[in-house]
Amino acid sequence: MDIGQKIYDLRRARGLTQAQLAKMVGVSEAAIRAYETGRRRPKQAHLERIAAALEIRPEAIADYGIESADEVIHLLFRLERRWKLRPEEVVDGHFFLESSDGDVFAAVHAWGEMRSRLDAGEITVEEYELWQDTYTSKKYVG
């Protein structure tokens, strides 16, 4: 999902109009419309203000430019080198992510717990997505 669609979806989910979000962010309504339609990309400062107005982490709407399986795997390779994230075979050819970096381990663990809660029907898709959009490892690192 691109930045514009994410902004649109989150704005609508919070019951805000483009004009209301624009006022909260300090930009014109036309700017919000241009961001949502993909005609313009918000500058970093605007992205941060949009995220704050939508009560999410800026990383939740950042565009990482991942468009293909090759890009996904090369991102994972980079994460392995930088954060010691690696696949770990557990059962019957199924692989799971593991990291010896404490912060990354805690983040992946928290993700796994929330995904399990979603799969078990303990939380809704909306609750899971809100958790994703607001997640910061700072909450989970002791």
Image: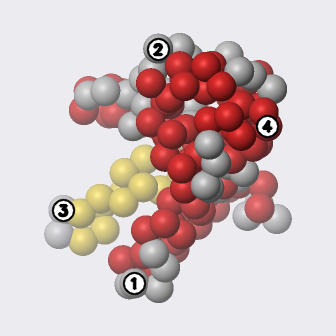
Q: Is residue 115 above or below residue 82?
A: below
Give the percent coordinates (x, y) of residue 61: 56, 37
Q: Which residue is mark 4?
A: 24
Instruction: Say which quadrant the C terminus sits in.
Output: bottom right
Q: Nearer the viewer, residue 15 or 43?
A: 15
Q: Which residue is mark 1?
A: 121
Sequence-wise, the earlier of marks 1 and 3 is 3
Give how far apart the Cα atoms at labels 1 and 3 are. 26 Å
Give the percent coordinates (x, y) of residue 71: 33, 26
In this rendering, which labeled residue sits more in front, label 2 or label 3? 2
In this rendering, which labeled residue sits more in front, label 4 or label 3? 4
Mark 2: few/some/many CA within 10 Å (<14, 14-19, 20+): few
Q: Outermost residue toward the left?
A: 92
Q: Which residue is mark 2?
A: 39
Give the SS element for disc 2: loop
Q: Amino acid at mark 2?
A: Arg
Q: Nearer the viewer, residue 12 or 139?
A: 12
Give how far apart the Cα atoms at labels 1 and 4 are. 35 Å
Mark 4: few/some/many CA within 10 Å (<14, 14-19, 20+): some
Which residue is found at the position 69% from the left and 47% from the top? Answer: 54
- The quadrant in which residue 1 appears is top left
